[in-house]
Image: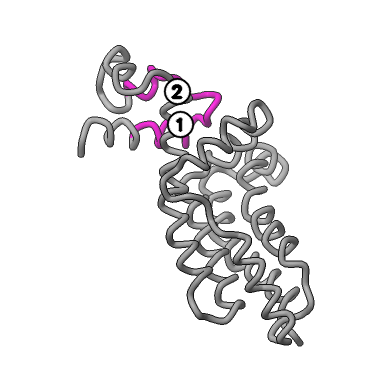
Amino acid sequence: MTTESKIIEAAKKVFLRKGYSGARMQDIADEVGMNKALLHYYFRNKESLFRMIFLESFKTMTPVMNNMISENSPVVDKIKTFISIYSEMLQNNPYLPLFLINELAQDPERITSALLQNGEGLPDFGLFMDKIHEASERGEINKVDPMSIIINIISLCVYPYVAKPMMTLLFKKDEFEYNAFLSQRKAEITNLILKIIEIQ
């Protein structure tokens, strides 16, 4: 691994343990085993380091997502795959949802421009909505609002990560128990969405 790769992996571990707001550059330097001055040589601040991790997660997800959307497969299979891909990204990067929400609240243009500048682009949700609409018109699935279906999936996947501190307190779950719950969510979300779209 390059030094930069080691820093990114160390930062992911620190962000996972402490969250974005709780993490410090010194924590990341300690995790990777270097002094903070050298860390700042590679990454100016915590924000630039996190933004790289954030964009890398989209860079990995976008091509897979767009291949799934464009390929010739039943829309029900596309939706199952979408839930699987999105859930897996969140499991690998559980700190991203809260960071994204905070960034969008503080400076939406900064985060949207970063995504648009990403070489891999964004998932083609316009085409995905068209595919859902066409399947609906052909009678393959129930009459549904494609945008609502996609937003429902994203919301159901994201909320348990954003609300994790409150949920662990309310339901008296430790880290291990809550992570086990998150691992089961993919099947739960898939079943919920299929009940909405599948013709009985």
The image quadrant of residue 30 is top left
Coloration of the structure image: one colour
Q: Is residue 188 left or right of residue 121?
A: right
Residue 4 badge: none
Q: Name the residue under label 2.
A: 46
Asked if the magenta segment contains residue 175, the reply would be no
Relative to the observer, which residue lies in front, 154 or 125? 125
- Disc 2, SS: helix
Residue lying at 33% horizontally and 37% vertically, measured from the top left: 9
Q: What residue type is labelled 1?
A: Phe
- The answer to if 23 sits in the magenta stretch is yes
Q: What residue lies at 21% left-to-right and 35% top-to-bottom?
A: 2
- The residue carrying mark 1 is 50
Q: Quarter of the image containing the C terminus? A: bottom right
- Residue segment shown in magenta: 10-30
Residue 108: percent from left, percent from top:
64, 32
User: Looking at the rendering, in which quadrant would you find the N terminus?
Assistant: top left
Q: Do the residues labelled 1 and 2 touch (CB within 8 Å)?
A: yes
Does 37 appear above or below 42? Answer: above
| Vertical side of 126 occupied by 25: above or below | above
